[in-house]
């Protein structure tokens, strides 16, 4: 399974509906500083519910909605606004079964599951009132339904599916002990350390 395309609409710097195709093996996105490369990664984390707002470089959800005056002095509330991000997953290899998708969507009516569409919308109705909506193949669902489904395909918020800007530097400048913990985590040794600690506790 891989991400086939992203559709960003009024998300961060993407003021116009933009479809970004991604290839199966390797896709490079290049552009000048501030052109929106990291915003594309933020859009994936946002739509799949993989990060808190700090992880997507925003203080609060409405900061993710396109704002033409973003770099100017903070203006007042300028009426109802909304942003949407759709992540289209290629499931042609059957990573997720129809049963899994149907169960997550809570409906038989999920269409063709060769493609799985996860969409999140954030809508601001008032200065400090906003709502989030999630859709799985067009059916309205909860964030936990999306997260449970993705976890069955090995995509979790704790996983290293995304290496953020600064993560590599952090690993390089880390103490040997902390770096060892990451390696233990990846190698699956950490769970035994936890069990050992529990056993000693008893
Ligand atoms: P770099 O090469 O420096 O990492 P980048 O291509 O990753 O740059 P991003 O961080 O993705 O750039 O984009 C930053 C731009 O996005 C800034 O110009 C910022 O003003 C704009 N931006 C962020 N949030 C919004 C928003 N809600 N509305 C409009 N523009 C926004
Ligand atoms: Mg960047």
Image (cartoon, rainbow, N blue to C red):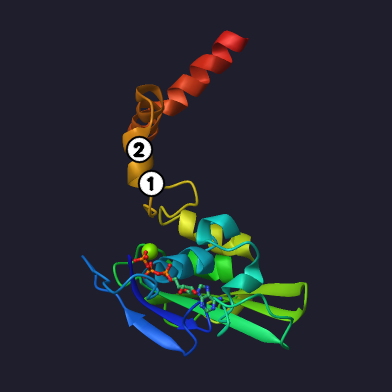
Q: Can you see residue 106?
A: no
Give the residue drawn at x 55%, y 62%.
49
Residue at mark 1: C-beta within 8 A of ligand 2: no
Give the residue drawn at x 53%, y 70%.
102
Residue 99 vertical position relative to residue 79 in the rendered view, above or below: above
Percent across and percent down for residue 195 are 51, 20
Secondary structure under tag 1 reads: helix
Q: CA distance from mark 2 to mark 1?
A: 6 Å
Label 2, residues with CA under 10 Å away: few <14, some 14-19, many ≥20: few
Secondary structure under tag 2 reads: helix
Query: Is 150 in front, or is 87?
Result: 87
Q: Is residue 145 left or right of residue 33?
A: right
Quadrant placement of the C terminus:
top right
The residue indicated by pointer 2 is: 171
Q: Can you see residue 87?
A: yes
Percent across and percent down for residue 105 are 58, 71
Q: Is residue 21 left or right of residue 16?
A: left
The residue indicated by pointer 1 is: 167
Query: Is 49 in front, or is 59?
Result: 59
Given contact means CB atoms under 8 Å apart, are the residues at marks 2 and 1 in contact?
Answer: yes
Query: Is 99 in front, or is 115?
Result: 115
Give the residue drawn at x 71%, y 74%.
131
Residue 165 figure quarter: bottom left
Quadrant placement of the N terminus:
bottom left
Label 1, residues with CA under 10 Å away: few <14, some 14-19, many ≥20: few
Percent across and percent down for residue 32 are 30, 73
Residue at mark 2: C-beta within 8 A of ligand 2: no
So how many labels did they put on this image? Answer: 2
Mark linked to residue 132: none
Q: Is residue 72 left or right of residue 176?
A: right
Q: Is residue 89 left or right of residue 105?
A: left
Ligand 1 position by quadrant: bottom left
């Amino acid at each position: 399974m891989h991400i086939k395309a992203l559709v960003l609409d009024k998300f961060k710097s993407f003021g116009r509906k933009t479809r970004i195709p991604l290839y199966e093996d390797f896709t490079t996105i290049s552009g000048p500083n501030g052109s929106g490369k990291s915003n594309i990664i933020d859009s994936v984390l946002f739509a799949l519910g993989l990060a808190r707002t700090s992880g997507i470089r925003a203080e609060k959800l409405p900061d993710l909605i396109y704002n033409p005056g973003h770099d100017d002095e903070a203006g007042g509330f300028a009426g109802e606004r909304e942003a949407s991000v759709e992540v289209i997953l290629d499931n042609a290899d059957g990573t997720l079964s129809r049963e899994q998708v149907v169960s997550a969507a809570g409906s038989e009516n999920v269409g063709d599951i060769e493609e799985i569409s996860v969409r999140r919308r954030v809508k601001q109705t008032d200065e400090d009132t906003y709502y989030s909506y999630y859709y799985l193949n067009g059916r309205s669902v909860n964030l936990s339904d999306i997260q449970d489904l993705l976890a069955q395909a090995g995509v979790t918020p704790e996983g290293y599916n995304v290496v953020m800007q600064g993560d590599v530097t952090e690993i390089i400048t880390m103490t040997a002990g902390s770096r060892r913990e990451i390696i233990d985590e990846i190698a699956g040794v950490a769970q035994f350390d936890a069990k050992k600690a529990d056993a000693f506790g008893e």
